[in-house]
Amino acid sequence: MSSEQANHSQGAFAAVRAKDSSSSAPVCAVPECSALAATVLRQQAWCVDHFLEQSYQALERLEQQRGTERDGRPLAVREQAGEEVRTFLNECSAQALNVSLGVEKLGNLERSRLLDILLWAGELSEALRRPAAQFGPGSGVRCPNNSATSPS
């Protein structure tokens, strides 16, 4: 993550904090959730549980889009603004790392999910850069129906 992206994420978190006049700490963006926000993703404050949920949903959508391949590149992702996808993957990775290092009371399951998000976002980032010949079975890229990667 570049320093510019880090400053943007910190600025977004500060803006959310400033908007919340009822307390000094921002709360999760989910209306029914009163947990304190642990991070900001896509300019929304999220508690740990909802950050995990939002990250998994977004990564799953990108993974499914990647499944529609033409000439080895992810068709739907390639046709989207590629830079927007890269920016999201970088932000998602950085925020997963920030949460894992910055939130004191994380259980092993939450830590493992944060690591999974970090690795999955990295795999998708690599898939965007990978030449067409390196796609397919045995490429080590996660299969949509299975959370494990194929052996390389």
Image (tube, rainbow, N blue to C red):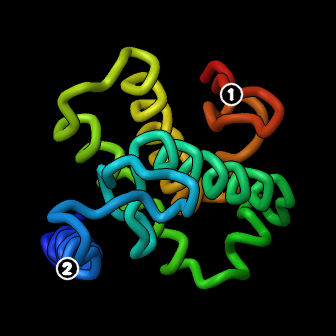
Q: Which mark is residue 43?
A: none
Query: Who's the residue at 84% across and 65% down the image?
Result: 70
Q: Earlier in the sequence, mark 2 or mark 1?
A: 2
Query: Who's the residue at 35% across and 45% down the image?
Result: 96
Q: Residue 142 falls in which quadrant of the image?
A: top right
Left or right of 81? Residue 119 is: left
In the rendered structure, which amino acid carries the disc numbered 1? Ser
Q: Which residue is the site of mark 2?
A: 18
Residue that extends furthest to the front in the rendered view of this protein: 22
Tell which of 51 and 144 is nearer to you: 51
Residue 137 at least partly seen:
yes
Q: Is residue 43 above or below residue 33?
A: below
Residue 9 at least partly seen:
no
Q: Residues within 10 Å of mark 2 (few under 14, many from 20)?
A: some
Q: Which residue is the site of mark 1?
A: 147
Q: Residue 94 falls in which quadrant of the image?
A: bottom left
Q: Is residue 140 above or below residue 126?
A: above
Quick one: quadrant of the N terminus?
bottom left
Q: Is residue 19 above or below residue 57?
A: below
Tell which of 43 and 74 is nearer to you: 43
